[in-house]
Image (cartoon, rainbow, N blue to C red):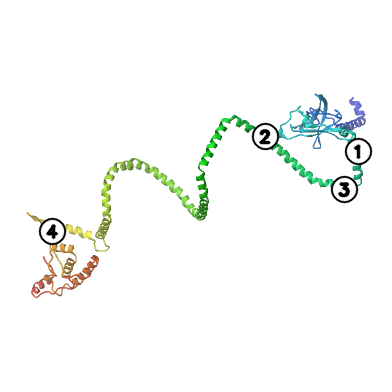
């Protein structure tokens, strides 16, 4: 065999080419004749899903003649066998698997493809919301419509009607002869009306769906109300009571409605005022934002401080407050009486504070303050009172004074009764006795100035009868005595 093929190679190739061309031509012819290979054949195999459709009549439907199933002008399958069930024709539709989505609201129409009644099924697969028909399922007769022949229409008419119809058709044919363009223009004018009618049909379809849904919901509501008649009766009674209360409050409601315009006016004014407030409040809050941001850290620190001081407040201050309560209650009347004297005590302590400040003041330099000399005074006091007898300590002292100082001291005694008492207890020498007329003039002038200042401070005027305004003149009898004392700078034991 191999030798023969090698011997007749050209002939063998020619036969192969002819066989290949024959296969291609045959495949093309079979494909146009709608010849499909089984699904198990790879690449070129086809898989179909069978559905059934009920028709009142399957006139001119012939299985095996290539009659097809069309969806929107696209062939999706072909017609299989036809059977009869309870006076209805059951037409099998073999649909390609990729188009096998047919729903319960699908429709199927038998239409002639040619004038020889070569039938096809024009199908609308429906919408997914109605549910899908399973494989092998049947489309009900209510969703299908067979082809109607013109002679069937004419057969339903009587003889006179058929005659009139023939005359009408003949007259129409004569009238339209040569008027095709006018007829076309007339029909085009109906295009907007058809668009509007299509919109109306769409809205009516939606209305039908809404009505269907409303009826369904109303049925559910009626069932629910029927199951809850007791609660419904209670609701009606409660509503009756509520409306009864409203009826009893009719006068109050009228008064409320009468006052409502004024309230609304005030509310409007308040809203206007609040608008001005918010316009000012916005920038203020923006400026306060850094403060609020900084407050966060302060609050955190305060929280730590509060945590640290809680034991002190809880374990120390709170028990102390509880124990001090009776004491504070007892001190309350005394505190009330003390409050009346508080203004005078405030003045007293203010003066005392000034005095203590002056006593405690230590000036810069070699000059010392009062407290320094007070320490020396305490030391000298101990030395002065070092001697005593049966009656107690004996004070010994030596007072040195000038005539100026005696004049000032006498003027101070005359200007203030309290100072005069102290001067009397001091028992100083008499100015007129120890000082001559020429000495003490400077002290007298200083004494007069100090006395006037005291009068102004106490509101007693600037002069006083008997006050010292100039040094008194010494008598002739006192001259010898004062001469010796002047030599000693007015020193007296």
How far is mark 3 from mark 1, CA to CA?
23 Å
How far is mark 3 from mark 2, CA to CA?
49 Å
* Of labels 1 and 2, the one closer to you: 1
Residue at which label 2 appears: 215
Q: Position of residue 222 (x, y in %)?
A: 63, 32
Residue at which label 1 appears: 166
Name, please, the residue furthest toward the left. Answer: 390
Q: Position of residue 197 (x, y in %)?
A: 77, 43
Label 1 vs 2, first from the N-terminus? 1
SS under mark 4: helix
Q: Which dot marks residue 384? A: 4
Q: Which dot marks residue 285? A: none
Horizontally, residue 351 falls left or right of residue 466, namely right
Residue 397, image quadrant? bottom left
SS under mark 3: helix
Label 3 vs 4, first from the N-terminus? 3
Q: Position of residue 94 (x, y in %)?
A: 80, 29
Location of residue 306 with respect to 449 vertically, above or below:
above
- Name the residue nearer the viewer: 75 or 15: 75
Mark 1: few/some/many CA within 10 Å (<14, 14-19, 20+): few
Label 3 vs 2, first from the N-terminus? 3
Residue at which label 3 appears: 182
Q: Quadrant of the C terminus?
A: bottom left
């Amino acid at each position: 065999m191999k030798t023969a093929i090698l011997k007749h190679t050209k002939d063998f190739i020619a036969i192969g080419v002819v066989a290949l061309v024959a296969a291609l031509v045959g495949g093309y012819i079979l494909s146009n004749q709608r010849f499909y290979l089984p699904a198990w054949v790879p690449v070129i195999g086809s898989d179909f899903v069978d559905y059934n459709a009920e028709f009142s009549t399957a006139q001119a439907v012939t299985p095996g003649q290539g009659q097809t199933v069309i969806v929107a002008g696209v062939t999706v399958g072909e017609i299989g066998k036809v059977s009869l069930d309870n006076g209805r024709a059951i037409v099998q539709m073999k649909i390609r698997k990729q188009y096998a989505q047919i729903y319960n609201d699908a429709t199927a129409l038998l239409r002639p493809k040619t004038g020889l009644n070569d039938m096809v099924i024009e199908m609308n697969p429906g919408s997914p919301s109605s549910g899908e028909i399973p494989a092998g399922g049947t489309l009900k007769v209510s969703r299908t419509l067979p082809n109607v022949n013109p002679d069937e229409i004419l057969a339903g008419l009587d003889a006179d009607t058929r005659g009139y119809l023939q005359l009408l058709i003949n007259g129409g044919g004569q009238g339209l002869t040569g008027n095709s363009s006018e007829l076309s223009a007339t029909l085009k004018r109906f295009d907007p009306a058809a668009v509007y009618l299509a919109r109306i049909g769409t809205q009516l379809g939606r209305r039908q769906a809404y009505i269907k849904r409303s009826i369904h919901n109303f049925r559910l509501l009626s069932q629910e109300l029927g199951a809850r008649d007791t609660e419904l009766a209670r609701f009606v009674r409660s509503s009756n009571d509520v409306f009864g209360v409203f009826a009893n409050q009719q006068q109050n409601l009228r008064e409320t409605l009468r006052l409502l315009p004024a309230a609304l006016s005030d509310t409007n004014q308040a809203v206007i005022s609040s608008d001005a407030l918010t316009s000012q409040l916005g920038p203020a809050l923006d400026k306060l934002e850094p403060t609020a941001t900084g407050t966060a850290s302060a609050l955190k620190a305060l929280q730590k401080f509060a945590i640290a001081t809680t034991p002190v407040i809880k374990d120390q201050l709170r028990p102390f407050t509880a124990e001090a309560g009776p004491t504070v209650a007892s001190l309350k009347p005394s505190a009330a009486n003390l409050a009346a004297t508080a203004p005078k005590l405030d003045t007293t302590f203010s003066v005392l504070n000034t005095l203590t400040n002056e006593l405690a003041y230590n000036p810069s330099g070699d000059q010392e303050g009062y407290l320094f000399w007070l320490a020396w005074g305490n030391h000298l006091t101990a030395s002065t009172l070092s001697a005593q007898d049966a009656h107690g300590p004996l004070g010994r002292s030596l007072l040195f004074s000038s005539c100026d100082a005696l004049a000032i001291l006498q003027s101070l005694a005359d200007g203030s009764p309290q100072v005069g008492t102290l001067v009397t207890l001091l028992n100083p020498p008499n100015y007129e006795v120890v000082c001559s007329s020429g000495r003490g003039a400077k002290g007298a002038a200083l004494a007069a100035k100090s006395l006037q200042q005291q009068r102004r401070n106490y509101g007693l005027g600037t002069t006083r009868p008997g006050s010292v305004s100039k040094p008194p003149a010494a008598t002739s009898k006192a001259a010898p005595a004062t001469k010796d004392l002047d030599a000693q700078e007015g020193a007296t034991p």
